[in-house]
Image (cartoon, helix red, strand yellow):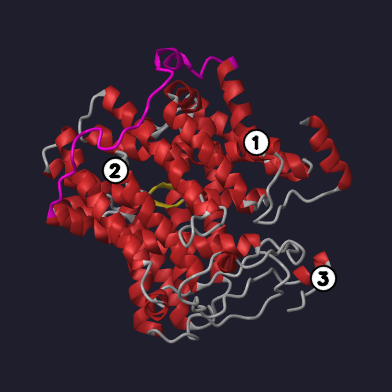
Amino acid sequence: MARVAARLSASGEQSSHPVDEVLPLPKLALYGFQHVLAFYAGAVIVPIIVGSALKLSPEQLVYLINADLFTCGIASIIQAWGIGRVGARLPLIQGVTFTAVSPMIAIGLGAGGGTAALLVIYGAVITAGLATFAFAWLPAKAFRAVMRLFPPVVTGTVITVLGIVLIPVGLKDAAGGAPTIADGGVPTQLAYAGGTMLFILVLMKFGGPFLRSIGILLGLVGGTVAAFLLGDAKFGNVGQSDWIGVTTPFHFGAPKFEWFPILLMLIVMLITMVETTGDTYAVGDIVGKEIDSETVARALRADGAATALGGILNSFPYVAFAENVGLVRMTKVKSRFVVVAAGVFMIVLGLIPKAAAIVASVPPGVLGGAATVMFGMVALAGIQTLAKVDLKEEKNALIVGVSLAFALFPATVPAYFDKHVSPDVSSLLNSGVTLGATAAILLNLVFNGLAEDDARSAPQADPAADPAGEPVAEQAAEPVAEQAEPADPPVELPAQPVAAPAGAEKAHGAETPSP
């Protein structure tokens, strides 16, 4: 490994890889494991929150976590590798969506809690997944008409909202975890967070290309080692965990299909479709891929298939994880096969509770320090998407500004919906992502309608640069949409030019590639 790093540093090779490049096995394993660590906390927090709210036993909770990781691995492989016309073939990690947490808890409590509640939840999850999968197979013209609801002013706002909403999650971990926040947090955990962040930033500033590409992984490992030496990293649960834990379909029983939970979950999937659409455009910009309607449709089909599979394998709704889009942006490791490797790791973790317990032993402060950096990069990805929008137009500026305000309301007045809105409505609206995304869609319709150019106009930028200003002319591979033979020719969405910082062309000497 040291020889690889030395060669990369000596040659000055960028740690960027084309999206379709298959890397050597050691690199695939290392970069893939970094993706797993980056999203691990977000992946397991949903089953932990839902399982705790439904009063599940510790053994049932462990089973939910293993089932989640196992399904995450399968879903990520489908999304990144692609099966026919399912999967975007982009470096997109699939994870359980936070948007579904409150609705699932409401559904579960309404069903009386316990495993009986899980059966009602899984019935709604399976139905919503199948509906999403079917939606993404609409004829090309119909699908394009729907996707016109999501121009850059909407997708950019949603990605920015995701980053802004996620940053407090990272900061809470940095302070010691949510249970400690009311008491002012834990200073030692905050110190670990600060040390981890500083370590990552130093690597990004002074490290070679290879070290920068695994900066998050090294930060997590270094912070955990430091915490262990100081007695704050506990690995006692590792010895108590089983070696093997196999996930079986319908482990808790046959799902139950009730109309209101299904309706609630369908609304959740509408929001996740906006998230996945935004993440697809964002990662497309980062890796230098032109994103068309067929690519978005394949990404949504993977979402739907993964969600339906989640309901079968005792898990929850899935979405493209914005956290890992931020990781791709930071490391510039663009190969989709890295995500395939991460999927294999997740499947293994889902089968070996003892291995998962090791990863779960990362102290919250260390995890929060690394996560805060990545979540900030997610918000930056949204801002870069908004750079395509003519924000000098007051209507576009209002869409962004008012949507951000709506997104911050649940965090600012967390008890409002619980106190003044019915439980069914509160379970859906008490989410910054839901409110922000809904506001962006509705405001865009009010101000811009479905006109193709109003919200999409932006100053033209150097197409040879990625969002970070790095040349991508030599990295571009064939468009993703050409990797499959669609039954209907894909209908191109209006052009989404990749924006670059002013002066990027001069700074990097990039040349515009010929058509």
Q: Earlier in the sequence, mark 2 or mark 3?
A: 2
Q: What amino acid does circle 1 point to?
A: Leu
Which percent across, then down, holds residue 392?
54, 81
Which percent across, then down, holds residue 201?
68, 42
Which percent across, then down, holds residue 469?
72, 64
Q: Name the residue under label 2.
A: 312
Write the residue at 47% across / 66% down. 296
Q: What amino acid does circle 2 point to?
A: Ile
Write the residue at 67% across / 35% down. 199
Check if residue 233 falls in the magenta segment.
yes
Q: What amino acid does circle 3 point to?
A: Lys
Please state the extent of the stretch shown in magenta in the rendering. 229-258
Residue 30: mark in rendering: 1
Residue 490: mark in rendering: none
Relative horizontal placement of residue 375, taking residue 260 as reference (left or right): right
| Badge 1: residue crowd in 10 Å (few <14, some 14–19, many ≥20) | some
- Which of the 4 image quarters holds residue 250? top left
